[in-house]
Amino acid sequence: MFTFLLWCLLFVLCWPLALLALVAYPFIWLLLLPFRIVGVAVHGVLEVIYLAITLPFRLLAAPFRI
């Protein structure tokens, strides 16, 4: 909702720029999509590495939890 209000403000102040942003947004989203996919994959790999490193400590601490 906030983004829409900002776009409306931009439309009032400079309508050609607002229309350009409206047309360019899907293309920019498609251009950035591979980077989002790589980010999700890297996050998953780092999470697996973190869990593999901390697994022994969690296994040693588990019997002592109440």
Image (tube, rainbow, N blue to C red):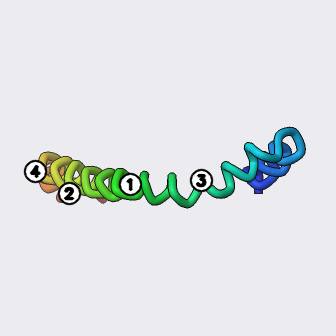
Residue 66: x, y in percent? Answer: 31, 59
Residue 56 lies left or right of residue 19; in this view the side is: left
Going from N to C along the chain, the mark reached first, 3 or 4, is 3
Of 61 and 5, which appears nearest the observer? 5
Circle nearer the viewer, 3 or 4? 3
Q: Are marks 3 and 4 in contact (CB under 8 Å)?
A: no
Residue 37 lies left or right of residue 32; in this view the side is: left
Quickly name the residue at label 4.
Answer: 56
Residue 48: x, y in percent? Answer: 19, 55
Q: How far apart are labels 3 and 1 at the CA level? A: 18 Å
Mark 1 burial class by Cα count in 10 Å: few <14, some 14-19, many 20+: few
Circle nearer the viewer, 3 or 1? 3
Which numbered disc covers residue 24? 3
Going from N to C along the chain, the mark reached first, 4 or 1, is 1
Quickly name the residue at label 2.
Answer: 62
Of 3 and 53, which appears nearest the observer? 3
Residue 37 lies left or right of residue 21; in this view the side is: left
Mark 4 belongs to which amino acid?
A: Pro
Mark 4 secondary-structure assignment: helix
User: What's the residue at 83%, 48% (across, down)?
Assistant: 11
Circle nearer the viewer, 4 or 2? 4
Q: Residue furthest top?
A: 13
Circle nearer the viewer, 4 or 1? 1
Q: Are marks 4 and 1 in contact (CB under 8 Å)?
A: no
Q: Is residue 9 above or below residue 36?
A: above
